[in-house]
Image (cartoon, coloured by chain):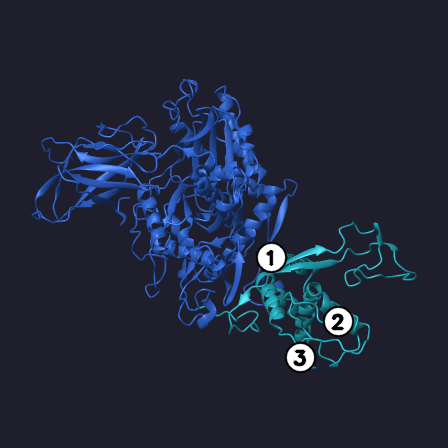
Chain colours: A blue, B cyan
């Protein structure tokens, strides 16, 4: 395989994607030559522009909606779909043909990610695509845009890093890797977004980061994107005289982001308009959401401004006569954003969950509690023991601590351009720390909030060649399969379930777990399902550990896994004893294999991504 | 487009297109300057619309006898109008009869138009002042200064170096980034009619 000229980092975001690259031949040590690809995309029918961000939207037009070459790109004259800015703007007026938030659907355990279900509220005649296919199209577009701009360095020959939320489960990771493979990404590695943000910060500091963090620091990365909130903890340790970074914990998957904030504000303003007797229609509500986003940014960045006027244009050509006029006041913003999404709460606060009504519409499982600070408190509380096993950290946290004490905070995501929000989180966190007698956490400054993930991913490809400090840590969960314990059947009672650890916490890329001693019977030729569990706190369990009971707080059920033994050389219906073997691939996905005793054979065990009714 | 009896709308379109072309194309600006100064220009009435593409300035301005004027396509001007309409509702605003509205109502709409126009300008042009000094500050212009970029006004006598104060910093477009268009795309439709089904 030829040497890659570039390390390419791709931020496949819920609402926007971006591509950054490091020229490996022109980089040396802490001096890196880096760029961001302006992605060629349609911005209007028949109009092509190069923009830094590719909106992660897919539009599936009606055949008579556009002229034949309106969807053409410089590298492909005829298309029947659009990706990017045109898809976003076109879809605002025709949402039934717009695929959005494909990434959130890709990790939605309640639906079949390989079946054509999007747009999910489209009438039957509209063609649909699967969440996987939508991701493939975004990734393909980025590859084609690169190849168009860099014909001298084909994409397939470069090192690619694609970022994913740290909270993605193994199935979602594998689907992302599969989408990348289908999109023609030959040399691809996955990287967690909060890690990418930290890499970007390290790179941007140009070597100064060693002065800003010290051994014993615990860096909390708070990454609030358009659609998701992602939390990670990274410890700074010393090994062989060098600083080393160790990712010790990741948060749960929280579908909550900047877009939720804009939408909430739009509804607040729409209610105000309704009270004045003006009912905003769906089109105006969308326009109001855009107006609120701009107003939010103004109010959040300039504390002097007390109100921002909002004008929602009429749909017709009468601009002055038909426009709605209102304003967004600081009080409304504070009430909605600061108190709604970032309330000052105690360290003991936990997100409120309510039981979903019996029949919910099939949609995305948005976070039920919008308060990011409560999710943060829950995360730190759950991870209070995260450092116990880490060398150099034993006994550092006081035994009375009720949550893990970070010493530094790195923010990522456009919403943190606002000092108000940064201050609110820092003050809340420092309030918790002060209550337990700990030092306040420092803010790691100088982060690039919009493009950090793509940049950090490109830099990671460079670091992987041994050119800089790497974040270690491996998998942030231990994995278990559910086995029914043998006991006499009792009518009306399910047999108790035990969880067998098959992959311990902290497996690094490219490593294998030991074979557990326990064997299972697989029926030749028939798919066998196992219940599958993950834990982000059980760091001590080794392969073969059996759990008899666990709290749902510690161990969460993931999607089922499924193994099918091909009947080659066997009689269908026979039961073959196998053991389950786990490995983490170089790309960063978890692979499970069924290994029959006494032979060198291995069969892949699949994650069941077809969705289940109870998920 | 180059009809001699331009409609009012046609003239607005021409004026706006010309405005930005003047900003972006130094040679064209010089041509318009000559036109305004009453010099005879080869084909009488139709004001040529030059594409803002980075083409070398036509001929040398030192040859006023027969300035070479290009018959450029109006596509770039139409594109810009389309962008201003899409992002700033520019044509809607100008075409609306504002006589019956209060200043508050017009002001509210103007805010929207202003925001949009500014977004279009910032997105598609890199516009910088010709002179970075503050307006009102004294400057000295050495011999051979760029007469296209700096206009002398008032008591214009003597010879360089000229000393004076900046009354307007000027604007120049350093970069133009207009969308590339598909071959058969009709740029004349600056805003399609919308029909909701």
Q: Is mark 3 on a helix, strand or loop?
A: loop
Q: Residues within 10 Å of mark 2 (few under 14, many from 20)?
A: many
- In the rendered view, tell whether residue A444 sits above or below residue A160: above
| Mark 1 or 2: the one toward you | 2
- In the rendered view, tell whether residue B56 sits above or below residue A40: below
- In the rendered view, tell whether residue A167 sits above or below residue A17: above
Question: Residue drawn at (7%, 48%), measured in percent from left and top?
Answer: A571
Same chain for mark 2 and mark 3? The answer is yes
Mark 1, residue position: B123
- Residue A274 in view here: no
- Label 1 resides on the chain identified as B
Q: In this view, does B132 lie to the left or right of A202?
A: right
The answer to which of marks 3 and 1 sits earlier in the sequence is: 3
Q: What element carries label 2?
A: helix
Q: Which residue is more in the foreground, A307 or A603?
A: A603
Mark 3, residue position: B2
The answer to which of marks 2 and 3 sits earlier in the sequence is: 3
Q: Position of residue A429 (x, y in %)?
A: 50, 29
Question: Residue drawn at (69%, 74%), measured in percent from left and top?
Answer: B11
Question: Residue drawn at (43%, 31%), measured in percent from left and top?
Answer: A233
């Amino acid at each position: 395989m030829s040497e890659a000229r570039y390390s390419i980092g791709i931020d496949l975001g819920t609402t926007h994607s971006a591509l950054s690259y490091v020229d490996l031949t022109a980089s040396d040590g802490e001096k890196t030559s880096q760029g961001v690809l302006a992605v060629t995309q349609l911005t209007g029918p028949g109009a092509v522009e190069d923009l830094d961000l590719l909106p992660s939207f897919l539009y599936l037009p009606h055949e008579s909606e556009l002229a034949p070459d309106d969807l053409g790109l410089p590298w492909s004259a005829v298309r029947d779909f659009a990706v990017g800015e045109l898809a976003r703007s076109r879809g605002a007026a025709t949402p039934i043909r717009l695929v959005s938030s494909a990434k959130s659907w890709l990790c939605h355990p309640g639906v079949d990610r390989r079946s054509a279900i999007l747009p999910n509220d489209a009438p039957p005649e509209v063609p649909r695509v699967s969440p996987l296919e939508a991701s493939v199209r975004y990734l393909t577009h980025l590859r084609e845009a690169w190849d168009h701009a860099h014909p001298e360095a084909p994409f397939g020959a470069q090192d690619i890093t694609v970022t994913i939320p740290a909270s993605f489960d193994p199935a979602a990771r594998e689907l992302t890797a599969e989408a990348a493979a289908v999109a023609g990404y030959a040399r691809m590695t996955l990287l967690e977004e909060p890690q990418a943000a930290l890499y970007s910060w390290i790179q941007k500091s140009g070597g100064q980061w060693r002065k800003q963090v010290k051994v014993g620091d615990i860096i909390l990365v708070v990454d609030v994107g358009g659609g998701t909130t992602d939390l990670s903890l990274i410890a700074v340790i010393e090994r062989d005289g060098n600083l080393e970074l160790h990712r010790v914990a990741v948060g749960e998957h929280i579908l909550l982001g900047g877009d939720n904030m804009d939408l909430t504000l739009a509804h607040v303003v729409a209610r105000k308009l309704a009270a004045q007797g003006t009912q905003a229609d769906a089109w105006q509500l969308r326009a109001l959401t855009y107006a609120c986003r701009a107003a939010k940014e103004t109010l959040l960045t300039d504390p002097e401004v007390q109100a921002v006027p909002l004008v929602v244009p009429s749909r017709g050509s009468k601009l002055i006569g038909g426009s709605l006029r209102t304003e967004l006041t600081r009080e409304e913003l504070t009430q909605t954003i600061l108190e709604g999404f970032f309330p000052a709460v105690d360290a003991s606060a936990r997100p409120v969950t309510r039981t979903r009504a019996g029949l919910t519409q099939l949609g995305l499982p948005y976070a039920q509690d919008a308060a990011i600070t409560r999710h943060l408190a829950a995360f730190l509380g759950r991870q209070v023991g995260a450092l116990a096993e880490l060398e150099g950290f034993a006994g550092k946290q006081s035994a009375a601590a009720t949550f893990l004490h970070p010493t530094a905070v790195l923010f990522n995501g456009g919403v943190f351009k606002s000092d108000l929000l940064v201050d609110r989180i820092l003050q809340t966190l420092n309030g918790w720390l002060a209550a337990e007698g700990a030092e306040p956490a420092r803010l790691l400054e100088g982060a690039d909030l919009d493009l950090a993930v793509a940049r950090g991913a490109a830099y990671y490809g460079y670091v992987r060649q041994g050119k800089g400090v790497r974040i270690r840590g491996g998998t942030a969960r231990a994995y278990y399969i559910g086995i029914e314990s043998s006991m006499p059947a009792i009518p009306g009672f399910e047999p108790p379930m035990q969880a067998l650890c098959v992959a311990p916490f902290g497996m690094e890329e490219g490593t294998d777990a030991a074979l557990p001693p326990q064997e299972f019977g697989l029926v030749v030729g028939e798919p066998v399902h196992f219940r599958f569990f993950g834990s982000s706190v059980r760091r001590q369990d080794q392969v073969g550990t059996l759990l008899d009971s666990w709290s749902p707080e510690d161990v969460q059920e993931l999607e089922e896994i499924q193994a099918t033994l091909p009947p080659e050389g066997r009689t269908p219906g026979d039961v073959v004893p196998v053991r389950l073997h786990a490995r983490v691939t170089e790309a960063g996905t978890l692979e499970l294999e069924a290994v029959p005793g006494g032979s060198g054979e291995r069969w892949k065990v699949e994650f069941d991504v077809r969705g289940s009714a109870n998920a | 487009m180059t009809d001699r009896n331009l409609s009012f709308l046609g003239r607005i379109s021409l004026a706006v297109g010309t405005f930005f072309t003047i900003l972006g194309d130094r040679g064209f600006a010089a041509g318009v300057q000559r036109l305004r100064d009453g010099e005879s220009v080869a084909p009488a009435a139709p004001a040529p619309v030059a594409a803002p593409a980075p083409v070398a300035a036509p001929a040398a301005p030192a040859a006023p006898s027969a300035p070479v004027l290009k018959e450029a396509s109006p596509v770039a001007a139409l594109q810009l109008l389309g962008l201003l309409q899409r992002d700033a509702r520019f044509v809607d605003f100008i075409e609306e009869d504002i006589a019956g509205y209060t200043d508050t109502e017009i002001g509210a709409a103007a805010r929207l138009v202003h925001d949009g126009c500014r977004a279009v300008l910032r997105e598609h042009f890199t516009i910088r002042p010709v002179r970075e000094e503050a307006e009102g500050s004294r400057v000295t212009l050495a011999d051979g200064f760029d007469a296209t970029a700096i206009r002398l006004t008032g008591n214009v006598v003597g010879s360089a170096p000229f000393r004076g104060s900046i009354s307007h910093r000027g604007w120049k477009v350093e970069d133009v980034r207009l969308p590339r268009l598909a071959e058969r795309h009709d740029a004349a439709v600056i805003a399609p009619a919308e029909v909701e089904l």
